[in-house]
Image (cartoon, grey):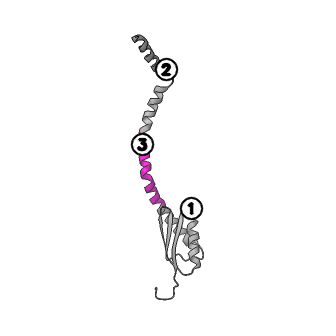
Amino acid sequence: MGSRLGGQVVGAALAFAIAGGAPCASAQTPVSPAVDTSAQKAAVAPTAARRRSDTMLAGDVRRALVRNPGLNSMNIHVQVRGGIVTLTGWVPQRSQIERASIAARSVRGVRAVSNRLTVRTGHGSGR
């Protein structure tokens, strides 16, 4: 019986090797650490990429505001967090509030615009 059992074990091992099980197992071993490493990088990368992206978006929104004819963007401040743009400051005419929103929304990558602009005319003491 011992030799019969031994023959079955050898036969099973041979069938496994012929089926490609052994090379497949060794081919997968080196891949696993690379997957773990890229998973760790992926966990860190979105935060850094988002910050850079937000900074780039803020610059793009400022350029869109400056290029917009009929919009005085000198006193408009732009902040971006997670792709959401916040416009603060003031403009001299009410119509420019909507123009600023449209210009900011036109920038690729902007998810939403929070427009907190107010109207202030140049006349007066700045109150």
Residue 45 sits inside the magenta stretch: yes
Image location of residue 54, percent across then percent down: 48, 62
- As helix, strand or loop, the secondary structure at mark 3 comes to helix
2 vs 3, front mark: 2
Dot 2 or dot 1, earlier in sequence = 2
Using the image as rendered, state which of residue 65 and residue 101 is in the foreground.
101
* Tags 2 and 1 touching, CB below 8 Å: no
To which residue does mark 3 refer? 36
Q: Report the disc number at residue 14.
A: none
**Considering only order in the chain, which callout, 3 or 2, is on the residue closer to the N terminus?**
2
Task: Answer with mark 1 or mark 3, whichever residue precedes in sequence.
Answer: 3
Residue at disc 2, secondary structure: helix
The residue where tag 1 is placed is: 108
Does the segment drawn in magenta span residue 104? no
Q: Position of residue 56 (x, y in %)?
A: 49, 62
Compared with 13, 62 (above or below) is below
Main secondary structure type of the part rendered in magenta: helix
Residue where numbered disc 2 is placed: 15
Looking at the picture, how far across and down is residue 93, in whole percent? 57, 81
Looking at the image, the residue that sits furthest to the bottom is: 124
User: What separation in Å lies between label 2 and label 1 (alpha carbons)?
Assistant: 57 Å
Which of discs 1 and 3 lies nearer the camera? The answer is 3
Q: Give the range drawn in magenta.
A: 33-53
Q: Is residue 9 left or right of residue 112?
A: left
The residue nearer to you, when weighing 57 against 13, is 13
